[in-house]
Amino acid sequence: MIRLLIGLIAAALLISGASFYFLQIEVNELVVGLCIRVGALLAVMCLAFPQLMVLKNKLPAILVIGSMTCLIIIAARPNLGRVVITLTTVAFTLGGILKWLSKINKPPPKRPSGPG
């Protein structure tokens, strides 16, 4: 159901972007580029949906959702690419460091006392 919805949104964006471009309808150039870029990205996500679900099971959900959000932001506004990639890298690095530190600070498990 989600794959079909993503495919329909992608098709709608690609068709509207192409119609704006070829029919020369008076809209901002940003709208045409945005429709085509985000539509193409969503079309690729629709085609790769089964692999993304396998990836979601192997990686934390926040990582997959964050990566997809970053890709959509970069597709919509390419000038923000460096900022988004830098902030995402810093956030994931800090998250990994904090997770590693939480593993270090856990006390060792107590051994059960046996008979005698």
Image (cartoon, grey):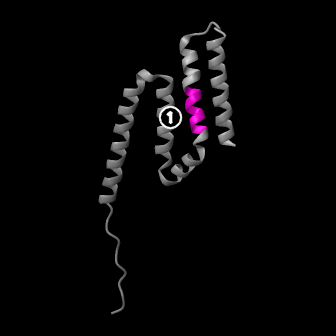
Quadrant of residue 33 in the image? top right
> What is the three-letter code of the residue carrying label 1?
Thr
Q: Estimate the x, y position of residue 73 in percent, counting from the top left.
A: 49, 28
Q: Estimate the x, y position of residue 113 in percent, counting from the top left.
A: 35, 84
Q: Is residue 68 above or below residue 96?
A: above
Q: Estimate the x, y position of residue 5 in percent, counting from the top left.
A: 68, 36
Q: Estimate the x, y position of residue 26 in percent, counting from the top left.
A: 63, 6
Quadrant location of the N terminus?
Answer: top right
Mark 1 lies on residue: 69
Horizontally, residue 61 falls left or right of residue 81, namely right
Quadrant location of the C terminus?
Answer: bottom left
Along the viewing direction, whichever of 45 and 88 lies nearer the viewer: 45
Residue at (37, 39) in percent of width and height = 91
Horizontally, residue 112 falls left or right of residue 3, namely left
Q: Is residue 18 above or below residue 2?
A: above
Per the rendered image, the range of residues in magenta is 38-46
Residue at (50, 34) in percent of width and height = 69
